[in-house]
Structure formats: C-alpha cells, structure tokens
Image (cartoon, rainbow, N blue to C red):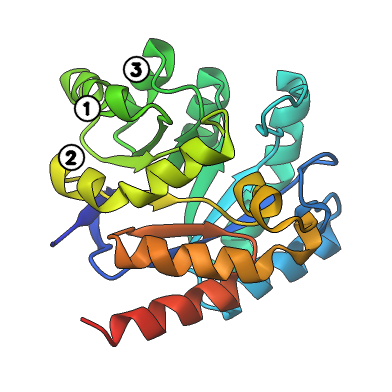
Amino acid sequence: MSCYLNIKGKLHDISHPQVMGILNVTPDSFFADSRIMDEESFTRRVQQIRDEGAAMIDIGAVSTRPGSRPAAVEEEFERLSWSLPLVRGIWPEAIISVDTFRPEVARKVIEDYGADIINDISGGCPEMTDVVSSLHVPYILTQPDFRLMGESLEMLHERGVADVILDPGFGFAGSTEKDFQMLSRLSALVDVLSCPVLVGVSRKSMIKNTLGVSTEDALTGTICLNTIALLKGASILRVHDVREAAQCIRLCSKLA
C-alpha cells in the first residue's frame, strides 16, 4: 500500500517502514537509558539515533507514561527550547516529532522550532486538533480502544487534519491481555482504516509482564513484537533501540 506524509509541503514515503527513535529530555521516563538532561549527552544520542538508521526522532519533554505526574507547561517549554534547535543543527533532514498533549506547546514547537509531527496521547482533543489542522502538520492519534478508532479518525478528517498516523497506544489499554489483542488485530486495523500505523511497544509492560523481565532486559521481547508488527503492516516503529529495529525492517523486507 502506497503511503505518504506531507511534511512541510513535501511528500515523505512511508510505504517502506520507518524507525522513529525516542529521545526524552525528562528525568522520569520509564526507561532510564532514554533520559537525557544535558546538551552533551543529547548530542550523542541524536547522532546515535541518526547513525543507527532512524528517519524520525520523537522528542518528549514531559513524561506521558500511565500514572506519571506531568511537568509544568513552563518546564516543558524550557526543555524543548534548547533541545529542538540542537536536533536541527546536528541532523537537519530529520523528521522531528514532539510528544506532547498540550495544544499551546504543540503550536509553539511548530511555529518557533519547526517541529514536523505532533505525537499526542490525548486522543484528539478539539484544541489540539485545531492546532495541527491550522498549521498543516501530521498528527499521531493515540487511541487504545479499537471500537473508537474509526470514529476518532473520521472526526480528525472532518476537522481538517489531513495526515493522521494511528498509534494503538500499547501500554495505555489497561491490561497486557488487551495490548496483545490489539497487536493480533493490527493487520485488520491497517486494512480497514487505510492509514499508517505507528507501533510503540519498546520495552513496555506487555513484554515485562509476560516474560517476567525488567525494562533493561526487555530488548529481545521488543525485537520479537516489532517483527510481528511489521508483518502485520506497521509503517513506523517507535523505539529506544534504533539499530535493532532497523535490522528488523531490513530482514522483514526480504519477505515481500
């Protein structure tokens, strides 16, 4: 299936799956190795994500894991104000996604720092929808309820959001069983809704709870589930471990 995203007026082909590397400028993200709070470490991490094969980078300045206590909006702004210009300086061609649920933050990072995509866990609140629609940027819709996905997608299109990437919200569904049910139905989701699907299972609880391992020991499980997701039609893998995800894509492409 041909699939393109309009990034600042240019069509970006994601018919061949892409890797989105995670970089968190937060002190409390669930995976400690993804937490970067100084410019030197940030620079090294951006370079690593680029060199290991990602096309996209997802910057988070406030933890959105279930049960977390979000940082104040001023603190989120401050973290993004130094980190986003650094990404552009290090990796000018990167497609930059910003992980935020706050419409005022989304507007600022698009207008002031040239963010390309907004990654939002709120499920398409009207205020956020207005921002991404008026500024013409792709929007990652997090919707862990299979029954509501079609309705949410239709609502976004009606409000003028042309490019929607669907994230089934692994880790937000409420249970490991529901997460695996969603993964098992992923190909049907791709076929029915006809929009690109982002899968973010990297080192998450569905792996840890099933295998009885720590976050640090969840890489093998992540590789396994990413491979399944690719075979079921995922367009984007959002990951902490870029090299391994890029290798999964390369191997799975041989089956086409």
- In the image, residue 253 sits, relative to residue 93, either above or below, namely below
- Residue 85 position in % (x across, y down): 63, 51
Is residue 148 found left or right of 143 in the rendered image?
left
- In the image, residue 71 sits, relative to residue 94, either above or below, namely above
As drawn, the label of residue 193 is 2
Distance from the alpha carbon under mark 3 to that under mark 2: 22 Å
**Quadrant of the image occupied by residue 71:** top right
- The disc, 3 or 2, on the residue closer to the chain's N-terminal end is 3
Distance from the alpha carbon under mark 2 to that under mark 1: 7 Å
- Residue 130 position in % (x across, y down): 34, 17
Q: Residue at x 74, y 23 (%)?
A: 70
Distance from the alpha carbon under mark 1 to that under mark 3: 19 Å
Which residue type carries mark 3? Asp
Is residue 230 found left or right of 42 in the rendered image?
left
**Quadrant of the image occupied by residue 140:** top left
**Quadrant of the image occupied by residue 243:** bottom right
Image quadrant holding the C terminus, namely: bottom left
The crowding category of the residue bearing disc 2, from other C-alpha atoms within 10 Å (few below 14, some 14 to 19, many at least 20), is: some
Image quadrant holding the N terminus, namely: bottom left
**Residue topped by disc 1:** 150
As drawn, the label of residue 130 is 3
- Residue 137 position in % (x across, y down): 34, 38
Is residue 224 found left or right of 152 in the rendered image?
right
Nearest the viewer among 57 and 241 is 241
Q: Residue at x 25, y 53 (%)?
A: 187
- Residue 13 position in % (x across, y down): 24, 64
Nearest the viewer among 162 and 43 is 162
Is the residue under label 1 in contact with that under label 2 (CB below 8 Å)? Answer: yes
